[in-house]
Amino acid sequence: QKEVEQNSGPLSVPEGAIASLNCTYSDRGSQSFFWYRQYSGKSPELIMSIYSNGDKEDGRFTAQLNKASQYVSLLIRDSQPSDSATYLCAASASKIIFGSGTRLSIRP
Amino acid sequence: SQTIHQWPATLVQPVGSPLSLECTVEGTSNPNLYWYRQAAGRGLQLLFYSVGIGQISSEVPQNLSASRPQDRQFILSSKKLLLSDSGFYLCAWDWNSGNTIYFGEGSWLTVV
């Protein structure tokens, strides 16, 4: 059974700090990796995709991929209250598999 | 640009009643289409996916069915709802399997 694992949280981070979200995947054939943000009661929206080992930065967000360790992470710098949401990690080989999400809470 | 819409946004249905959720994608052709369900506080469960008109694959056996009568239309149905069918239903699309998936707004179903 191909899986994507995430800590369910909640992860509580003070405003202005760095939030670090982690994810592991079991299918070594996975080639594409995604982070989605889901606000309570809303549908998931894509934050970032990453395909190669290393870091990919987009504004306050940095995705990190380590295929050897089968590990994906998302760093959020200068965390804001609006970042409070559930973050879904996804990995894709022939089809996309989602983790169950990590709930992030930014405290003032 | 591509957009995806699904409706209704919310509905409350009695046990044993039928269900029909609709989804359409605009601005693209021959998309892959998906139906997911998300129970409260849980992850996404893939229910059905379709790579073309009339081509439906079921991931989880249950009392739901899906149909794709047109290229950009995907319908989720049930003849008799169960209490366990309650949840947040999401339609989604992508161009090629394994690529970025884009979600519709979601439909909240409460079976009472």
Image: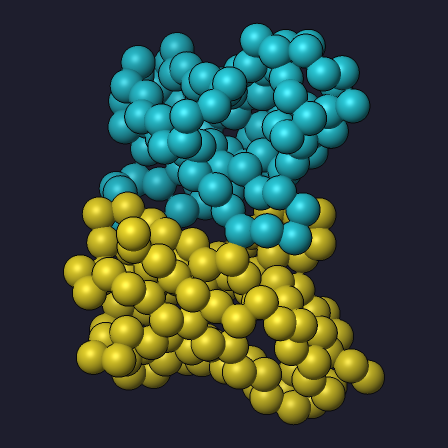
Q: Colour of chain A?
A: yellow
Quadrant of residue B22 in the image? top right
**Residue depicted at 67% across the width and 72% down the height:** A10
The answer to whether one can see residue B6 in this image is: yes
- Judged left or right of residue A14, residue A74 is left
Up-down: is B23 above or below A88? above
Q: Position of residue A6 (x, y in %)?
A: 48, 68
Residue B77 in the figure: left or right of residue A33: right
Q: Position of residue A15 (x, y in %)?
A: 73, 86
Q: Is residue B37 left or right of residue B108?
A: left
Pick whichever, B103 or A30, lies toward us: A30
Residue B39: percent from left, percent from top: 62, 43
Residue under the image location 65 percent in, 91 percent down: A17
Q: Which image quarter holds the C terminus of chain A?
A: bottom right
**Farthest bottom residue?**
A17
In this figure, what is the number of numbered marks? 0
Does residue B99 show up? no
Residue drawn at (28%, 64%) of the image: A26
Image position of A99 with respect to B91: above or below: below
Q: Quadrant of residue B73?
A: top left
- The image's colour scheme reads by chain
Q: Is residue A32 above or below residue A22?
A: above
Question: Which of A72/B26 is in front?
Answer: A72
Q: Position of residue A37 (x, y in %)?
A: 57, 61
Q: Colour of chain B?
A: cyan
In the image, farthest residue toward the right: A108
